[in-house]
Image (tube, rainbow, N blue to C red):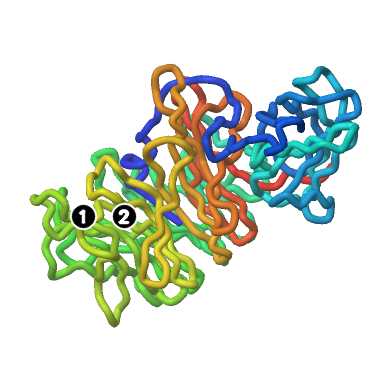
C-alpha cells in the first residue's frame, strides 16, 4: 500500500486533542439492550468494552436484575458455544444487582469481531447486551520514535515506514534504514511487496523528489519521462510493477506507472488536462487513484481505475469528490467518496461488481478506506463523534461484510489512530497519536499466546 502526500489530506481530518487511551464508545460498539422479558436481567455496558486476543482479564458487566447466582457468557451472533466464540468465562463474581465481574480468557484464535454479552440469572432468566464487547488486535509500537509512520506491510509481516531518521524496513523487531538516492537529502518509503521490494521517493528539502525501488539493500532510481521534473512511487505489486506520480511542473501531477521492470515512467493521464495520482496496483495491473480533469471547476474530482486496454475511467461518475486508494487481486476497490457530492461529507466505500457501497462511520461524520486484503477485509480511519480536549477523535478500523466496521485497540496513552495497510493475515499498520499530537508507527496484530 501507499499514500505519500495523501496523508496530509486524510490524517489531519479530526486530528489534535487529547483524552484517555480507551477504545471509544460509539453507536457501533454499544448497541446494547436487555431481554424483551421485563422480568429478566438487562445488560447495558461492559468495562472495558474491548480487548485483544490471547488475553485473560476481568470485565465489569453493567446493567440490572442480577442475583448472586448470575453468570456472564460471551456470544458471537448469539451463539455461546466456546467452539464458536473462543472466549471462556472462568468465573463470574456478583457485586450487586447492577454489576457483575466476569473473568474471561480470549483465545489466540478468537474472531476479530463484536461480541454479545449474555447474563443468565440463578433462576435461568436471560438478558443479552448486543455487540457490547470487541475482540481486537493488539497495538504494537514499532519503536521508530516520535513522528514516525508505518505505511505498508507484506504477508511475511515486514513493515515499511518512515521516521525522523529516515525511511525504514521493520522486520521482526529490527529496523533497517534505506538511505537516499545520490544528491537527495532524505527518503520516504510507501509500499513493500511480498518479495521484500520497497518503493518510495527520495527528496530534497525544496520538495524535488525522485522515485526509488529498494531491493536487498540497494536503491534504484525510477525516473520521470523526459521533460518532467520529478517522480514519486506509491505502490508496488508482487510482479514488481510500480505506480505513483510524475510532475510536469511544480504544481501539476500526473498518475504514472513503471511496468515490467521499467526505470522510466509512463504518464497514464496524458494527454488529458488536469491532475491525478496513482495510489495502488494489483496483480492484474489495474491501477486506482484520484483524477480531476477540471481542477479549476468545483466538483470535478473523482475515483478512477485504469488498465492499459481501457484507459482511465471514473468509478460511478466524475464528481464523487473521492479517491480510490486500495485494490486487491479480486478487483475490489476501497477509498472514500461523498454520498451527497459535498467535499465535506467523505465516507469510506468499497467498489465491487460495478457498484459502490458506503461503509459508514464509528459515530462521526467522516471515514476513509485505505486498503483491502484478499479476504475483503478493509482497514482505514473513522471519526468517532467523540471530542477529545475540544477536537473530534478518529481511530483505526477493520471492516468486513459480515461484521461491519469496528475500531482497533488504542495503545496505552494514545488517543487517535489510523490504519493504512492490511496483509493476508489481517495484520494492520499505520500510526497512533498521543494527546500532544505526536504520531508513532504502529502495528496491530494478534497478541502472541503466552
Q: Residue at x 77, y 25 (%)?
A: 65
Quarter of the figure with the C terminus: top right
**Of the numbered discs in the image, which one, if any, rests on residue 323?**
2
Earlier in the chain: of badge 2 and badge 1, it is: 1
Position of residue 289 in the picture relative to residue 392 (left or right): left
Circle 2: element type = strand
* Residue 102 on image: x %, y %: 82, 30
Question: Residue at label 1?
Answer: 301
**Of the numbered discs in the image, which one, if any, rests on residue 182?**
none
Q: Are marks 2 and 1 in contact (CB under 8 Å)?
A: yes
Q: Is residue 255 above or below residue 28?
A: below
**122 vs 406, nearest the viewer:** 122
**70 vs 123, nearest the viewer:** 123
Circle 1: element type = strand
Q: Residue at x 83, y 52 (%)?
A: 81
**12 vs 4, nearest the viewer:** 12
Q: Residue at x 23, y 59 (%)?
A: 291
* Residue 59 on image: x %, y %: 76, 29
**146 vs 313, nearest the viewer:** 313
Q: Residue at x 40, y 30 (%)?
A: 15
* Total count of labels: 2
Position of residue 387 in the picture relative to residue 96 (left or right): left
* Residue 294 on image: x %, y %: 11, 57
The residues tagged by marks 2 and 1 sit, at their Cα atoms, a distance apart of 8 Å
The answer to whether residue 376 of the structure is visible from this angle is yes
Image quadrant assignment for residue 265: bottom left
Amino acid at each position: 500500500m501507499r499514500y505519500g502526500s495523501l496523508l496530509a489530506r486524510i490524517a489531519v481530518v479530526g486530528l489534535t486533542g487529547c483524552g484517555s487511551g480507551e477504545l471509544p464508545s460509539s453507536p457501533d460498539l454499544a448497541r446494547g439492550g436487555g431481554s424483551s422479558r421485563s422480568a429478566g436481567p438487562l445488560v447495558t455496558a461492559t468495562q472495558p468494552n474491548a480487548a485483544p486476543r490471547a488475553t485473560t482479564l476481568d470485565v465489569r458487566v453493567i446493567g440490572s436484575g442480577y442475583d448472586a447466582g448470575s453468570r456472564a457468557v460471551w456470544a458471537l451472533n448469539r451463539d455461546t458455544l466456546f467452539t464458536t466464540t473462543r472466549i471462556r468465562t472462568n468465573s463470574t463474581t456478583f457485586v450487586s444487582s447492577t454489576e457483575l465481574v466476569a473473568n474471561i480468557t480470549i483465545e489466540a484464535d478468537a474472531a476479530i469481531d463484536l461480541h454479545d454479552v449474555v447474563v443468565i440469572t440463578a433462576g435461568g432468566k436471560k438478558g443479552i447486551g448486543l455487540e457490547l464487547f470487541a475482540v481486537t488486535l493488539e497495538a504494537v509500537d514499532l519503536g521508530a520514535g516520535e513522528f514516525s509512520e508505518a505505511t505498508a506491510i507484506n504477508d511475511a509481516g515486514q513493515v515499511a515506514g518512515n521516521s525522523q531518521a529516515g525511511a525504514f524496513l521493520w522486520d521482526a523487531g529490527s529496523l533497517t534504514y534505506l538511505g537516499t538516492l545520490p544528491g537527495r537529502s532524505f527518503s520516504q518509503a510507501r509500499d513493500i511487496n511480498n518479495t521484500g521490494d520497497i518503493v518510495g521517493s527520495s527528496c530534497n528539502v525544496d520538495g524535488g523528489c525522485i522515485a526509488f525501488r529498494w531491493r536487498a539493500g540497494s536503491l534504484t532510481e525510477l525516473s520521470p519521462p523526459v521533460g518532467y521534473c520529478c517522480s514519486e512511487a506509491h505502490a508496488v505489486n508482487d510482479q514488481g510493477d510500480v505506480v505513483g506520480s510524475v510532475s510536469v511542473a511544480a504544481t501539476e501531477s500526473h498518475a504514472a506507472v513503471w511496468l515490467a521492470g521499467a526505470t522510466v515512467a509512463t504518464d497514464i493521464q496524458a494527454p488529458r488536462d488536469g491532475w491525478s495520482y496513482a495510489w495502488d496496483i494489483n496483480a492484474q495491473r489495474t491501477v486506482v487513484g484520484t483524477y480531476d480533469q477540471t481542477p479549476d471547476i468545483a466538483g470535478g474530482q473523482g475515483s478512477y481505475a485504469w488498465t492499459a486496454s481501457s484507459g482511465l475511467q471514473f468509478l460511478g461518475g466524475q464528481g464523487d469528490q473521492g479517491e480510490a486508494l486500495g485494490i486487491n487481486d479480486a478487483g475490489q476497490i476501497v477509498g472514500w467518496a461523498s454520498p451527497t457530492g459535498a467535499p465535506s461529507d467523505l465516507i469510506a466505500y468499497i467498489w465491487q461488481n460495478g457498484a459502490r457501497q458506503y461503509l459508514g462511520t464509528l459515530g462521526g461524520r467522516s471515514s476513509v478506506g485505505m486498503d483491502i486484503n484478499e479476504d475483503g477485509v478493509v482497514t482505514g480511519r473513522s471519526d468517532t463523534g467523540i471530542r477529545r480536549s475540544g477536537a473530534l477523535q478518529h481511530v483505526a478500523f477493520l471492516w468486513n461484510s459480515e461484521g461491519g466496521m469496528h475500531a482497533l485497540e488504542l495503545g496505552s496513552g494514545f488517543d487517535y489512530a489510523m490504519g493504512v495497510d492490511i496483509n493476508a493475515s489481517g495484520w494492520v499498520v499505520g500510526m497512533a497519536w498521543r494527546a500532544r499530537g505526536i504520531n508513532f508507527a504502529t502495528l496491530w496484530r494478534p497478541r502472541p499466546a503466552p
